[in-house]
Image (tube, coloured by chain):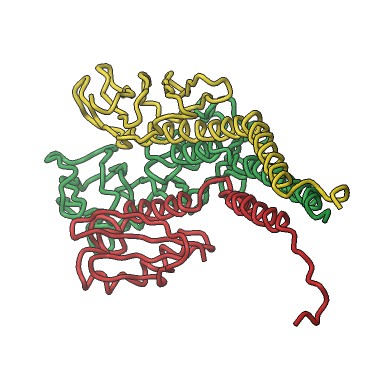
């Protein structure tokens, strides 16, 4: 009777458990090796683009619409608070202004980009950069007329 | 006691696999229902329409007296009663045909009833007697 | 008695099922990511350009939400250099294309409601039959009065009780006066004798506004 008996149930169960553990390990390594980093990068790319567009929309909205604002040179004409994500893909990032465009700079090469700013003619320059998550747009009057937009950190 | 045929054994592994598949499907359903569509947002477009209607009204010459059409209709209760039909017609003409609107002045309201389940754009204009609010939504 | 090992094929099938469902979920995630790429840049640029064109200090504007017909007819020249670089875009007014650069295939279109103002010059020659005043049929911001009164001399001109011109020696020639755009104006003339018809000519610019819908489509 012993020659037709299968392996003892305990060994059978141990075999099953071993196969399942192997399967889980294989699946985990396959996912974390390729699928998960790609998904994180894809999500980070999208979040970065939306953060950049949100920043650009706020910079444009900060410029006041009254054409004849009389202010002393250097005086702050308008200020606007902007909320940005603290990190993208676990790392910090920087948003830089360059007169007619805004760029997002991030360590990962597929996160980031540049977008154009649509501003009235009165705005002479846009400068500054942001590294925080709670930041300000400050619009000042230029001594020769016109406005200058500054990207400033929140606490300043 | 044992009349019926010997019972089959439901393999426990299949049950376990079924539960596992259910878990995975539950996670997958979180992103299977789709993401918000692109294009200019409905809310942003409606807000822009409301702001446009408010700006056009606020800068228009009035029918009778007072500074602008909006100031005239918000000036007093009598002025509102007199001007309300003209106001409704004017806003109806300004906005595209697929939009419905409601205008609230300190002395009364004109327009359709605001929907509770659709996106509604809003614009507010301050006047000397109070605030005039315009709501706009897709019909 | 071979039941102990009969579970292994069942286990293999079960694991295969789980692996297949994981693969399906990963595929679904991939398509969800592709669908999540809503291109926020297009809609932001469309909204910003539309806001710029409609603003009071926009390149085509006379005042807030009012464009000038002359500027609209010359739109491609006026907007040259004012629109964001590197993006295909199309600006339409009531469906007619004002500016088109490239071939924007996106659905990010922002629409704004505005008025287009036509400034036409009108001339009114009052008859002075019953009174020494005339009411302008359209509201206007300014007017030019030309006096050719001959014997009678007009000393004062009032617009809605406000004195706009006064000369004790008599007004002669052409004068520009500014009026309130929001009021209907009645011009009354104070003269030392009755005025003959045709002695005063009032030239003014009357603005007629038509409603229009501006559409901006951007494909960055």
Instruction: Tell me where residue C92 appears, x and y as whole percent.
Output: 58, 43
Chain shown in yellow: A
Closer-to-camera residue (C187/B135) = B135
Instruction: Tell me where residue B1 appears, x and y as whole percent.
Output: 75, 82
Closer-to-camera residue (B120/A75) = B120
Res. B84 image quadrant:
bottom left
Instruction: Residue at 75% x, 47% y: name it.
Output: A8
Instruction: Tell me where residue C205 appears, x and y as whole percent.
Output: 38, 45
Instruction: Residue at 65% x, 31% y: name it.
Output: A29
Q: Is residue C6 above or below residue B99?
A: above
Does any portion of residue C27 appear in the rendered image?
A: no
Colour applied to chain C: green
| Most distant residue in the left direction | C168
Does any portion of residue C206 appear in the rendered image?
A: yes
Q: Is residue C121 above or below residue B87?
A: above
Colour applied to chain B: red
Please state if C49 lies on the left or on the right of C219 as rendered: left
Instruction: Residue at 21% x, 64% y: name it.
Output: B75
């Amino acid at each position: 009777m012993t020659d037709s008996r299968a392996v003892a149930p305990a060994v059978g169960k141990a075999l099953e458990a071993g196969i399942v553990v192997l399967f889980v390990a294989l699946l985990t390594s396959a996912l974390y090796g390729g699928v998960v980093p790609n998904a994180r990068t894809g999500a980070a790319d999208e979040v970065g683009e939306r953060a950049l567009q949100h920043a650009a929309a706020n910079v444009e909205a900060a410029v006041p619409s009254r054409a004849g604002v009389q202010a002393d040179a250097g005086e702050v004409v308008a200020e606007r608070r902007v909320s940005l994500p603290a990190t993208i893909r676990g790392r910090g990032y920087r948003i830089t202004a360059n007169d007619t465009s805004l760029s997002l700079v991030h360590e990962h090469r597929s996160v980031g980009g540049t977008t154009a700013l649509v501003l009235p003619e009165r705005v002479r320059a846009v400068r500054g950069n942001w590294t925080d998550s709670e930041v300000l747009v400050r619009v000042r009057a230029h001594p020769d007329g016109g406005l200058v937009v500054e990207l400033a950190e929140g606490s300043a | 006691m044992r009349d019926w045929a010997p019972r089959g054994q439901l393999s426990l592994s299949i049950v376990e696999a079924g539960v596992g598949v259910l878990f995975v499907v539950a996670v997958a359903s979180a992103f299977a229902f789709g993401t918000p569509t692109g294009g200019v947002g409905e809310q942003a477009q409606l807000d822009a329409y409301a702001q446009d209607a408010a700006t056009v009204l606020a800068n228009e010459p009035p029918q009778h007296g007072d500074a602008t059409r909006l100031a005239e209709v918000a000036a007093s209760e009598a002025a509102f009663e007199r001007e309300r039909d003209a106001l409704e017609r004017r806003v109806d003409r300004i906005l595209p045909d697929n939009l419905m609107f409601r205008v609230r002045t300190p002395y009364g309201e004109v327009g359709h009833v605001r929907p509770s389940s659709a996106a509604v754009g809003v614009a507010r204009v301050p006047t000397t007697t109070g605030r005039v609010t315009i709501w706009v939504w897709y019909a | 008695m071979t039941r102990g090992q009969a579970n292994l094929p069942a286990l293999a099938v079960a694991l295969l099922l789980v692996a297949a469902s994981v693969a399906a979920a990963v595929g679904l995630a991939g398509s969800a990511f592709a669908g999540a790429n809503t291109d926020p840049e297009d809609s932001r640029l469309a909204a910003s350009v539309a806001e710029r064109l409609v603003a009071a200090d926009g390149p085509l504007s006379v005042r807030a939400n009012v464009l000038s017909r002359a500027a609209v007819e010359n739109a491609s020249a006026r907007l040259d250099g004012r629109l964001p670089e590197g993006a295909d875009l199309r600006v339409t007014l009531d469906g007619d294309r004002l500016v088109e650069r490239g071939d924007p295939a996106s659905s990010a279109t922002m629409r704004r409601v505005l008025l287009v103002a036509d400034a036409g010059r009108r001339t009114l020659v009052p008859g002075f039959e019953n009174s020494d005043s005339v009411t302008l049929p359209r509201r206007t911001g300014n007017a030019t009065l030309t006096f050719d009164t001959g014997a009678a001399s007009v000393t004062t001109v009032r617009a809605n009780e406000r004195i706009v011109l006064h000369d004790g020696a008599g007004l002669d020639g052409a004068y520009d006066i500014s009026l309130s755009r929001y009021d209907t104006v009645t011009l009354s003339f104070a003269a030392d004798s009755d005025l003959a018809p045709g002695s005063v000519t009032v030239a003014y610019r009357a603005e007629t506004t038509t409603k229009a819908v501006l559409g901006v489509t951007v494909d960055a």
